[in-house]
Amino acid sequence: MALDSYWASFEEISKYNVSLNYFERLWLAWYTYMQNDVLATGIMSFAMHEIVYFGRSLPWIIIDAIPWFRRYKLQQQKIPTAYEQWQCAFLVFISHVTVELPQIWLFHPMCQYFGMSTVVPFPSMYKMAFQIAVFFVLEDAWHYWIHRAMHWGPLYKNIHKIHHQYSAPFGLAAEYASPIEVMVLGLGTVGVPIAWCAITKDLHILTMYLWIVFRLFQAIDAHSGYEFPWSLHHFIPFWAGAEHHDIHHERFIGNYASSFRWWDYFLDTEAGPEAAKKRRERKMAKAKKAQ
C-alpha cells in the first residue's frame, strides 16, 4: 500500500522485504508510492535520460573551457563557443521533450507487451553484463548500415546534414540531429533489447536502463572531440571512440559505426590519413602484381 511519501513507502517496504538489497527496496518503493506503473516508468526513464545525457556532457563543456586540455583536442583550431554550447543544449532538450518524451511515455506498456520484467529482485550482474555486451554488438551493426545509408544524397541533404552542422563535434552534439534521425537510429538502441526480450522472454528493465546509460556515455564521448592517452581504444583496439568519430565529422564520410571499428575495417569504409595511405599501398601492390 502506498503511503503519504516516497520515503514512508520505502521504510514500510524495508520492514517486510528484508531479503531485498537497498537498491531493490528503493525501486519497489518508487512503484509502490506512484501507484501507476506507466507514470512511474515514464518519469524514471525520462529523468534518467536527461540526467545522464546532460550530466555526462558537463565534463566536456568544462574541458572545452580549459586551455590546458587543448593539447588533447583532435581539431585544435575548432573550439565550440559558449553560444554554440548553449544553443545546442537548448535544441537537444527541445528534441528530447517533443520527440523522445512521447515515446518514453509508451515505454512501460511496450515492456509489458513484450514481457520485460520490472519487478524485484534484479537479475545478476553477470546476466546484465552479457546482455549489454550483446546489445552493443547488435546496435553497432544497425548503426553502421543506417548511418551509412544516411550519407546517400537525398537522405543526407534532408535528414543527416543537421547532425553534421558541427564539423568538430562536442559532447552535447551527440543527439543534435533531425527528429527522423533520432527515431531511426534510436530504434537500434531501444529496438535491439526489445527484440531480445521478444525472442528470449528474459530481460529486466534495469538491464535496459544500464544499456542506455552505457550507450549514452559512448555516444557523448565519441562526440567529445578529445583523444587522451587513457582513451578506451588504447586498451580495446577495436573500440571506436572520439578519434574514430571525429574524423567522420571532419571529412563527412567513412567511419560509420558507433561503438566498434570492425564494420568499417572489413567493408573498407575507414576514413582518415592512415586509412587513405593503406588504400594507396594496396592499389600499388595490386598494380605491381598485375604487371
Image (cartoon, grey):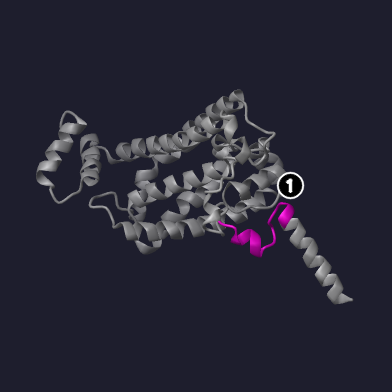
Q: Position of residue 278 (x, y in %)?
A: 74, 61
Residue marked by disc 1 = 153
Q: Nearer the viewer, residue 109 or 18?
A: 18
Residue drawn at 41 percent across, 40 percent down:
104
Q: Secondary structure at mark 1?
A: helix
Quick check: 7 above or below 270?
above
Q: Amino acid at mark 1?
A: Gly
Is 149 displayed left or right of 215 in the figure? right
Q: Is residue 131 visible?
A: yes
Q: Position of residue 71 (x, y in %)?
A: 62, 38
Q: Nearer the viewer, residue 282 or 121?
A: 282
Q: Nearer the viewer, residue 104 or 47?
A: 47
Q: Nearer the viewer, residue 100 or 18?
A: 18
Badge 1 local density, few (<14 within 10 Å), some, or many (20+)? few
Is 44 displayed left or right of 178 in the figure? left
Q: Position of residue 81 (x, y in %)?
A: 62, 26
Quick check: 5 above or below 229?
above
Q: Position of residue 252 (x, y in %)?
A: 71, 45
**Quadrant assignment for the C terminus:** bottom right
Q: Which residues are drawn in magenta?
A: 260-274
Residue drawn at 48 percent across, 32 percent down:
58
Q: Is residue 202 visible?
A: no
Residue drawn at 55 percent across, 37 percent down:
171
Q: Confirm whether the magenta stretch covers residue 12.
A: no
